[in-house]
Image (cartoon, rainbow, N blue to C red):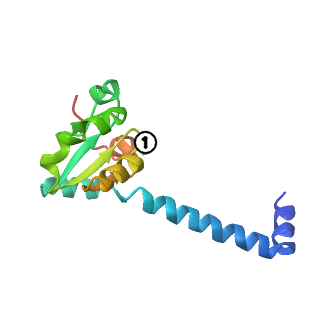
Amino acid sequence: MLANLIEFATTHYVLSGSFVVLLALLIASELRKGGQSLSSRELTALINSEQGVVLDVRGQKDFSAGHIAGALHIPYEKLASRMAELEKHKSKTLVVVDAMGQHAGTVSRELKKAGYHAAKLSGGIASWRGDNLPVVK
């Protein structure tokens, strides 16, 4: 299998090279779209310096099961209709948190279009818990 792949890549080097370049461009584009991605440590520093606010976009059941202390809760589906609630936090960075990072990039992008400073927690609440950081219920 690997030998066939190597043979294909050497025989069709232009095609293989084009694929690698396009893949790299796609990855770069997707990373840029979702905005800045923060680690758990960077998020903690931002909260401690009072320059950031956590916006949890998970559903009510998941939020109630455990969330980052002080997090605002606006479910992903209701963000468009409730964005005005975030107006008082416009001077701070809104850090979007979801379950595993699947919606955070989209929400971050929408917030940026609306004029907010936005970032996302890399890996969502799963990475926060994976780093053994506290959640409140």
Query: Left or right of 10: which side holds 39?
Result: left
The image quadrant that residue 100 belongs to is: top left
Q: Residue at x 67, y 69 (%)?
A: 20
Q: Amino acid at mark 1?
A: Met
Seen in the picture, residue 97 relative to 48 is either above or below; the reply is above
User: 10 Å neighbourhood of mark 1: few (<14), some, or many (≥20)?
Assistant: some
At x 64% / y 71%, what residue is drawn? 21
Name above or below for residue 119 compared with residue 81: below
Question: Dividing the picture into quarters, in which one does residue 19 lie?
Answer: bottom right
Q: Quadrant of residue 7?
A: bottom right
Residue at image mark 1: 100
Give above or below for 108 relative to 82: below
Residue 32 is left or right of residue 54, and the answer is right
Task: Name the quadrant of the C terminus.
Answer: top left
Q: Nearer the viewer, residue 81 or 118?
A: 81
Residue at 57 percent of width and 67 percent of height: 25
Is residue 121 in view? no
